[in-house]
Image (cartoon, rainbow, N blue to C red):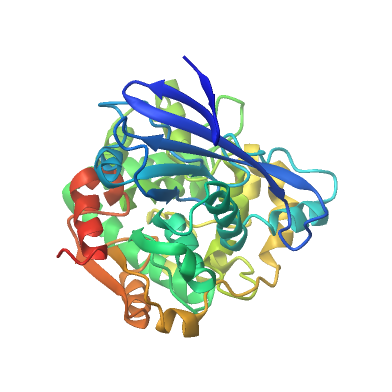
């Protein structure tokens, strides 16, 4: 039975108490009289936890909605642990999920780029602050996964007085470093993961070479009749940064590459698609702590990753992606404009160096998306941050480590370890 609660629409979903919140917020927080968009948040609580403090979950991406809690036991395992101490606000970051979507681009790519300049971590934090005030809270806690951790660090930089604690999972970004530094490390990590993969599945080197030869010959075609290029096919290295990704890649390559099932699974493994266009269009900007990125991944790509290389790439976005991936071609011009955008700085090193908000971060040794060296450099900057460095998980540790991983981080942040 659905009832109208003071803070939104509340209902019971398979043992969880779920309350929906929708706020009308400025597209540009600097122009409160201008266009507004809707931003959606789903508050999740255990039946006996309606008065617990709030933990806001910021998802990875950019461009991905929050996970959907479907109740016990199918809810994300980390959520089980979180609900012992908190209510959890699952925020659909602007442009995603039930928030006002970003869909097909308009006729003017520069106008689209101006619009999308309001979809970075700085705007997401201002949206979060609006939700905190809407819920009548003086402070709350933040759990940031991947890009959500970038938002968490922005939060610590601009509104630390709003925070009880911040937890980072695979998302402690570098401060003050150009995007070129970041991308250079991601290629080094991907080289290592490629080598590890082929040691584990030595027969797949030949299978991969055959697949890429078929791509060169125009014989791998998607269901819409578009040929899959070699360089596009090589981006299936993206799962190598995730727990279980190597196995998924192996099971793909053991299929007949001319079968419909293979092509379907190949397309599903590509990192960027039109289902989440923000992920492709804004991805490189998320690495900018000030300044333009100018297709950093393309410019910093090492020689051994170019041409007819067998090396698989990961979360790297290139200008050619908006040509080779047919469904992303409508976004080509707006992505090109955003690549030249002179982005403002996200993080304040001076504020962070004086931070007193209890925080904890898990840093993954072999993470190809958020480099360990730079994460630890940031950790040393923040006196109240405790780190857990591990090679037990890859970038998806929150999903695979679940309650056990989050339990340790909560205890670190609260000073119980």
Question: Which quarter of the figure is the C terminus placed in?
Answer: bottom left
Q: Residue furthest left?
A: 417
In the image, 169: left or right of 59?
left
Pick whichever, 57 or 287, lies toward us.
57
The residue that appears at 37% across and 71% down in the rendered structure is 357
Q: Is residue 312 above or below residue 46?
A: below
The image position of residue 7, as x and y in percent, is: 54, 36
Q: Is residue 235 above or below residue 284?
A: above
Q: Is residue 122 above or below residue 323?
A: below
The residue that appears at 26% across and 71% down in the rendered structure is 386
User: Does any portion of residue 124 appear in the rendered image?
Assistant: yes
The image position of residue 358, as x and y in percent, is: 32, 69
In the image, 154: left or right of 105?
left
The image position of residue 12, as x and y in percent, is: 40, 22
In the image, 202: left or right of 332?
left
Pick whichever, 210 or 356, lies toward us.
356
User: Does any portion of residue 198 appear in the rendered image?
Assistant: no
The residue that appears at 36% across and 78% down in the rendered structure is 382
The image position of residue 93, as x and y in percent, is: 56, 47
Tell me the quarter of the picture where residue 148 sits: bottom left
In the image, 247: left or right of 334?
left
Q: How many marks?
A: 0
Pick whichever, 78 or 262, lies toward us.
78
């Amino acid at each position: 039975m659905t009832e109208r609660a003071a803070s939104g629409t509340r209902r019971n979903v398979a043992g969880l108490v779920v309350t929906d919140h929708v706020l009308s917020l400025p597209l540009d927080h600097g122009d409160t009289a201008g266009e507004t968009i809707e931003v959606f948040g789903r508050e999740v609580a255990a039946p006996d936890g309606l008065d617990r403090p709030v933990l806001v979950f910021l998802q990875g991406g950019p461009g991905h909605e929050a996970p959907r809690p479907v109740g016990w036991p199918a809810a994300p395992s980390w959520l089980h642990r979180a609900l012992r101490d908190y209510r959890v606000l699952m925020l659909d970051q602007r442009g995603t999920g039930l928030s006002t979507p970003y869909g097909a681009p308009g006729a003017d790519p520069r106008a689209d780029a101006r619009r999308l300049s309001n979809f970075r971590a700085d705007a997401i934090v201002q949206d979060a602050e609006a939700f905190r005030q809407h819920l009548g809270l003086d402070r709350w806690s933040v759990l940031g996964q991947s890009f959500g951790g970038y938002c968490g660090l922005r939060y610590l930089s601009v509104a630390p007085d709003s925070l009880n604690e911040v937890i980072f999972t695979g998302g402690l970004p570098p401060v003050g470093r150009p995007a070129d530094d970041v991308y250079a490390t991601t290629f080094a990590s991907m080289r290592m993961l490629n080598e590890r993969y082929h040691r584990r599945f030595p027969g797949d080197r030949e299978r991969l070479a055959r697949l890429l030869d078929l791509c060169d010959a125009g014989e791998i075609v998607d269901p819409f009749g578009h040929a899959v290029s070699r360089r596009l096919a090589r981006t299936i290295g993206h799962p190598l940064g995730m727990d279980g990704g190597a196995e998924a890649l192996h099971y793909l390559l053991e299929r007949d590459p001319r079968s419909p099932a293979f092509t379907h699974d190949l397309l599903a493994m590509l990192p960027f698609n039109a289902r989440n266009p923000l992920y492709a269009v804004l991805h490189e900007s998320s690495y900018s702590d000030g300044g333009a990125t100018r297709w950093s991944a393309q410019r910093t790509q090492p020689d051994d990753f170019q041409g007819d290389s067998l090396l698989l790439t990961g979360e790297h976005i290139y200008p050619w992606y908006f040509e080779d991936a047919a469904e992303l071609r409508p976004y080509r011009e707006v992505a090109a404009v955003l690549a030249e955008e002179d982005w403002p700085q996200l993080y304040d090193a001076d504020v962070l160096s004086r931070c007193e908000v209890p925080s904890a971060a898990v840093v993954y040794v072999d993470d190809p998306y958020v480099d360990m060296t730079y994460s630890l450099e940031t950790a040393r900057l923040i006196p109240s941050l405790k780190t857990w460095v591990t090679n037990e998980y890859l970038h998806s540790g929150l999903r695979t480590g679940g309650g056990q991983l989050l339990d340790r981080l909560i205890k670190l942040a609260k000073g119980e370890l």
